[in-house]
Image (cartoon, helix red, strand yellow):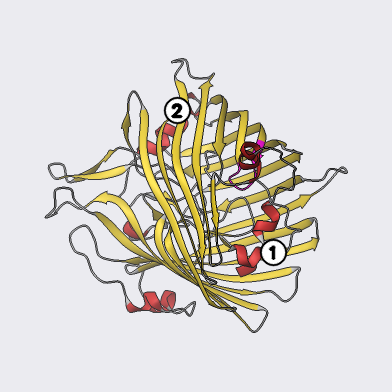
């Protein structure tokens, strides 16, 4: 769902998610339609369960994503489906404390190109005899690792939660297990919500009126089992992640942000060590100049945004890996609203480019990844990307269009795995076109009845060519990216 927030400068320099107290999201999501029955009031305007008192407010709603589809390019006539059930709980306690939590149970059968990708970056198990790692199971971006389900299906579950405390007007503390996103675009070349949710602690502060600072610390995982363990099932390798994000907003039109994201070593497959004390340092640009490539992998970048007026915004990002100008990424984009006399109409154009070595450390255990997934752009390294997106909503009906073109150069989907994996390099073009029509019942939980089509043409053809037609019902409160 697209929220036209008058293209204002986003608090915290577009370090997402933002908090309701910063952006008045409740006002934006409020439904003013008249309903004459308690059932329709709940379906169209409320959560399933709402309780409000003098010092508290609690809501509970079900989460669902039921869809069926077929791939016309798949001669095996596989029936594609997504079956997601869950629960969402959110509340405010006293004056300065709030929380949210949700749980998802999923079974799914995906298109062939999705299934192949999820499986090839899956869980790595050590093979002591051959001295290598074998891939088992799979991992779904934005969700979790999986288990097999029936014939070529996937079974997976995960939970997301946050607690937020605001002791003063200028300080906000949050912690939990979820994903984050840095930027104003559809993609981010700094940090995106493509990866699996991870435990975090975040500090957001405002100072000198025009300056904001965000510091976040998390624990990431290489989805590979340690070869030696004292438990029934071996642990995964872990690594640290720190981000320091300094934002200057001179006025309501401009926003300039300096980003530092660092992957920190916590040992290897045999030994585990404590993270370097500089992990806790909030001052950017110190660790990359002090520590070696065996200890950290750093991504330094800028996020810039300019609102031409209330309806038109330009934005961009640049990034560099390990202080090496050959490892670079860039983004340029534009987003506008209300063209052709149409309200609630959005148009977005974006270009992303990432070099071969970006996000790839000389120590593969420190690649810019989590659960074997890229934590910046979903495609990883070595591509150019052109995106055109449009959305229009009239009353409760909406239509989405999206066209994406990738230009690949010696691209490998397994390039960011923590171990070297032989894979065919791809050079050429991938084209995706997605359209979706739907009816939005409830804006608070983004409950939609929808149908659409996803077309994909791959440089290698075969399973990469897709003509996926689908229908379904979902509460769309999390992003899910299948456009790779």
Relative to 456, is 9 above or below? below
Residue 281, horizontal then vertical, whole percent: 42, 79
Q: Nearer the viewer, residue 37 or 363?
A: 37
- Please say whether residue 173 is visible from this viewpoint: yes
Return the mark for residue 112: 2
Residue 117, horizontal then vertical, whole percent: 42, 37
- Say what secondary structure mark 1 lies in: strand
Q: Which of 43 and 339 is in front in this view?
A: 43
Query: What are the residue bounds of the magenta stretch?
Result: 440-446
Q: Which residue is drawn at 80% across and 55% down?
A: 311
Residue 463, horizontal then vertical, whole percent: 46, 26
Relative to 251, is 207 above or below? below
Q: Which residue is drawn at 74% across and 40% down?
A: 393
- Please say whether residue 14 is visible from this viewpoint: no
Q: Does the magenta stretch include residue 375?
A: no
Identify residue for label 1. Answer: 305
- Say what secondary structure mark 2 lies in: helix
Residue 271, horizontal then vertical, whole percent: 19, 63
Q: Which quarter of the rendering shows the N terminus?
A: top right
Q: Which residue is drawn at 32% across and 44% down?
A: 421
Q: Residue at x 56, y 66 (%)?
A: 54
Give me the C-alpha separation between circle 1 and circle 2: 38 Å
Number of numbered markers:
2
């Amino acid at each position: 769902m697209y929220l036209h927030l008058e293209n204002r400068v986003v608090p915290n320099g577009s370090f997402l998610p933002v908090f309701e107290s910063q952006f008045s999201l409740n006002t934006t999501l409020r439904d003013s339609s008249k309903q004459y029955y308690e059932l329709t009031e709940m379906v169209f305007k409320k959560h399933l369960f709402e309780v409000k008192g003098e010092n508290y407010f609690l809501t509970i709603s079900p989460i669902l994503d039921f869809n069926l589809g077929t791939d016309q390019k798949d001669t095996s006539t596989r029936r594609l489906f997504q079956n997601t059930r869950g629960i969402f709980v959110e509340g405010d306690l006293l004056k300065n404390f709030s929380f949210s939590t949700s749980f998802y149970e999923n079974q799914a059968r995906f298109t062939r190109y999705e299934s192949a990708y999820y499986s090839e970056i899956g869980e790595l198990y050590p093979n002591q005899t051959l001295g290598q790692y074998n891939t088992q199971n799979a991992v779904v971006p934005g969700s979790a690792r999986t288990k097999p389900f029936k014939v070529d299906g996937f079974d997976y579950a995960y939970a997301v939660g946050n607690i937020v405390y605001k002791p003063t007007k200028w300080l906000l503390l949050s912690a939990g297990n979820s994903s984050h996103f840095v930027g104003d675009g559809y993609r981010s070349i700094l940090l995106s919500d493509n990866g699996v949710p991870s435990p975090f602690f975040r500090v957001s502060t405002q100072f000198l009126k025009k300056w904001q600072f965000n510091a976040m610390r998390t624990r990431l995982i290489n989805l590979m089992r340690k070869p030696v363990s004292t438990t029934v099932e071996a642990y995964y390798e872990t690594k640290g992640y720190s981000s320091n994000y300094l934002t200057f907003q001179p006025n309501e039109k401009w926003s300039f942000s300096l980003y530092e994201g660092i992957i920190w070593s916590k040992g290897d497959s045999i030994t585990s060590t404590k993270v370097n004390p500089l992990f806790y340092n909030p001052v950017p640009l110190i660790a990359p100049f002090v520590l070696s490539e065996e200890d950290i992998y750093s991504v330094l970048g800028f996020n810039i945004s300019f609102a031409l007026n209330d309806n038109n915004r330009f934005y961009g990002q640049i990034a560099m890996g390990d202080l090496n100008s050959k490892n670079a990424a860039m983004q340029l984009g534009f987003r506008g609203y209300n063209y052709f006399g149409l309200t609630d109409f959005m148009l977005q154009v974006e270009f992303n480019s990432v070099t071969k070595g970006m996000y790839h450390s000389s120590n593969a255990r420190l690649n810019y990844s989590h659960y074997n997934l890229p934590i910046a752009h979903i495609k990883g390294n070595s591509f150019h990307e052109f995106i055109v997106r449009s959305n229009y909503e009239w009353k409760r009906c909406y239509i989405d269009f999206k066209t994406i073109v990738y230009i690949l150069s010696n691209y490998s989907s397994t390039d960011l795995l923590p171990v070297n994996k032989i894979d065919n390099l791809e050079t050429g073009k991938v084209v995706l076109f997605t359209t979706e029509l739907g009816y939005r019942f409830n804006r608070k939980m983004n409950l939609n009845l929808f149908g659409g089509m996803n077309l994909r043409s791959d440089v290698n053809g075969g399973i990469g060519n897709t003509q996926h037609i689908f229908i379904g019902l979902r509460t769309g409160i999390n992003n899910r990216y299948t456009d790779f």
